[in-house]
Amino acid sequence: MNKLFCLAAAAALVLTAASHAQAQEPTLNDRATTLTQQMAQKVPLNEAQFVKVRRLNLNLLAATQELKGRFANDSATLDQRLAELQDNYEWDMAAILWPRQLAAYQRTRANMTALGSSTEQR
C-alpha cells in the first residue's frame, strides 16, 4: 500500500511539474509583445505603429512555427520559405516605419546579424 501511494504521489508530481512547465512557456502573443517592446527600445514607435508591428511580429512567429512543422523533413524548402517570409516581413516593416525609423531598424538588425555571425565563427 505504501509503494502504491508513493507511486501515485510521484506520478502526480510529474504531471504537476509538466503542466507547470508548460504554463511557464511563453505564448506566441507573449513572444510577439516582448519582441515588439525590444524593437521599440531601439526604434521609437508611436502607439499605432506599436500595434501594427506587434501584429506583424505575431504573424511572423506563427508563420515561422507553421513552416517549421510543415517542412521539418525538407530543410531546403524550409530555408526557402523562411527567406520568403523574412522578405515579406521586411517589406511590411518598411510600410509601417517612417524613413528615420526604418534606417534605425536596419542598423539595429545589421548589428544583431554582425554580432550573431561573429559569435558563430568562434
Image (cartoon, rainbow, N blue to C red):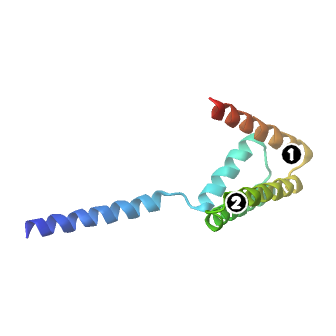
10 Å crowding of disc 1: few (<14), some (14-19), many (20+): some
- Residue at 72%, 42% (x, y): give it: 41
For badge 2, the amino acid type reads Leu
Q: Given the current orientation, which residue lies at the most extreme left position?
A: 1
Note whether 20 is above or below 98 in the view shown.
below
Residue identifier under label 1: 102
**Quadrant in the picture for residue 67:** bottom right
- Residue appearing at x 87%, y 52% in the figure: 94
Give the residue number, with chain letter if any, for mark 2. 78
Q: Please tell me which residue is depicted at 64% across the width and 68% down the height of the picture.
A: 70
Q: Nearer the viewer, residue 52 or 80?
A: 80
Percent across and percent down for residue 96 are 85, 55
- Cα distance between the residues tagged 1 and 2: 27 Å
Residue 69 horizontal side relative to residue 111, left or right: left
Q: Quadrant of residue 120?
A: top right
Q: Residue type at mark 1: give it.
A: Leu
In which quadrant of the rendered view does residue 22 lie?
A: bottom left
